[in-house]
Amino acid sequence: MSNMAKLVLNGKEYSLPVVVGSEGEVGIDIAKLRAETGAITLDDGYGNTGSCKSAITFIDGEKGILRYRGYDIADLVNGGCRFSEVAYLLLYGNLPNKEQGEKWRYNLTHHTLLHEDMKKFFEGFPPHAHPMAILSGMVACLSAYYPESEAHIEINTIRLLAKAKTIAAFSYKKSIGQPFVYPINHLSYAANFLRMMFAVPSEPYEVNPVFEKALNQLLILHADHEQNCSASTVRMVGSSGANLFASISAGIGALWGPLHGGANQAVIEMLEQIKADGGNHKKFVELAKKKDSGFRLMGFGHRVYKNYDPRSRILKDAADKVLNQAGIRDPLLDIAKGLEEAALSDSYFIERKLYPNVDFYSGLIYRAMGIPTNMFTVMFALGRLPGWIAQWKERREMEGLKISRPRQIYIGQTKRAFVPLEQRP
Ligand code: CMC
């Protein structure tokens, strides 16, 4: 392949460098385009824009491949990896050896407690506050407790990874009026979280190993997804020099939307709606095809995957296994499978290459664990944290502090004369 692309604009020819990634992805470097031609590129929604070079996560949307630092997602999940190891992999580039893993886990578990004063904030939130609002507020608030300098990035990374699950569990406890349950250091990340969510001081609590394993897998599957809306937000905010906690808090806000991480909550709400309507999933497939209905099949379609989302493939099996092992019969799982089958054999979905994404089956597993629907996006955020931090650090380390600042094509009013108030019609 040539290492230059040619562009002809107003009869003049320009050469633009071609950049090829390690998996053969091709990009045209337009960094000097405006300086040389006076023109910019326009790509509403960034569907065709590479915002950075990154060495963290590789996706081939056509083939349905997802790899973290070169490791296939299925190998990490099926190879018995812990979520904490995957976090280490994303942040430092390699899986930890035994000694590194032990030290990393020690650090993560020994920073799980929140500053006691932070607990007072939970009292101020209204009882039905959405836990995503609490999570994003409390994560931003960590910057008030742990001021940041370059020297603090490592320790703040550990603090954030460790404390986010405590914040998440406390927000749930607050919403149901139960006392906060403090973390226990010898438990795994997943087990510790489940215990903080569901244990009460008045009786013993055993973590269900089926749920612990499933949660560990879910967290791994969500751990990174290259330049999606929230990761791009984290990188963008970080590019201004904003601290880690503020940048991640902004990413949590981006994730909340129903077109992004909020879709896992929306899927269960949709399945409930179909059930309440009599369970006729075909009717809803038809509705999703009508543009003016305002209804989309939540958990279907993806900007990058034009094939089955590899995470959804794993989660579909996991949903079956977890529900079976836990002896739970959830009619929503049958509706989901019926919906998937109907959509995948429908020309509208086939032509547009719309397949189930990560959010389609994840909620059914969270539901089986007893996690309430409004906590689903929080679960996504807990999983995505290492990815966001890795993206934030990479942005800071690879590109220095060059601020992200896109341009625009202005389509508003051209210059007009000012009209004083008394003369305006
Ligand atoms: N149901 C019905 N039609 C759909 C759907 C859907 N779920 N998704 C896309 N389409 C149609 C869309 O109407 C368009 O049709 P046409 O070409 O006739 O105008 C075509 O497929 C392409 O869709 P798009 O909206 O241009 O694609 P996009 O890349 O901008 O959007 C998406 C991707 C994920 C936002 C979208 O597929 C969607 O809204 N899905 C439902 C929400 C969802 O499940 N989101 C979770 C995404 S995965 C996890 C994450 O990123 O957090």
Image: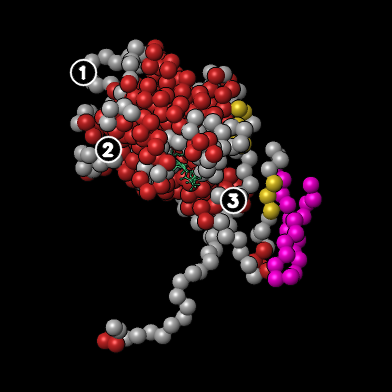
Is the distance from the Cβ of mark 2 to the nearest ligand 1 atom less than 8 Å?
no
Please provide percent x and percent y for residue 329: 33, 16
Residue contact between numbered discs 3 and 2, judged by CB atoms under 8 Å = no
The amino acid type, in three-letter code, at marker 3 is Asn
- Label of residue 313 in the image: none
Say how many tags the image has.
3
Query: Which quadrant holds residue 306?
Result: top right
Residue contact between numbered discs 1 and 2, judged by CB atoms under 8 Å = no
Give the dominant element type of the magenta stretch: helix, strand or loop. Answer: strand
Residue highlighted by disc 2: 119
User: Label 3 vs label 2: CA separation?
Assistant: 44 Å
Residue highlighted by disc 3: 48
Is 345 colored magenta in this rendering?
Answer: no
Residue highlighted by disc 1: 202
Region of the chain picked out in magenta, as a range: 1-21
99 is higher (above) or lower (below) than 92: above
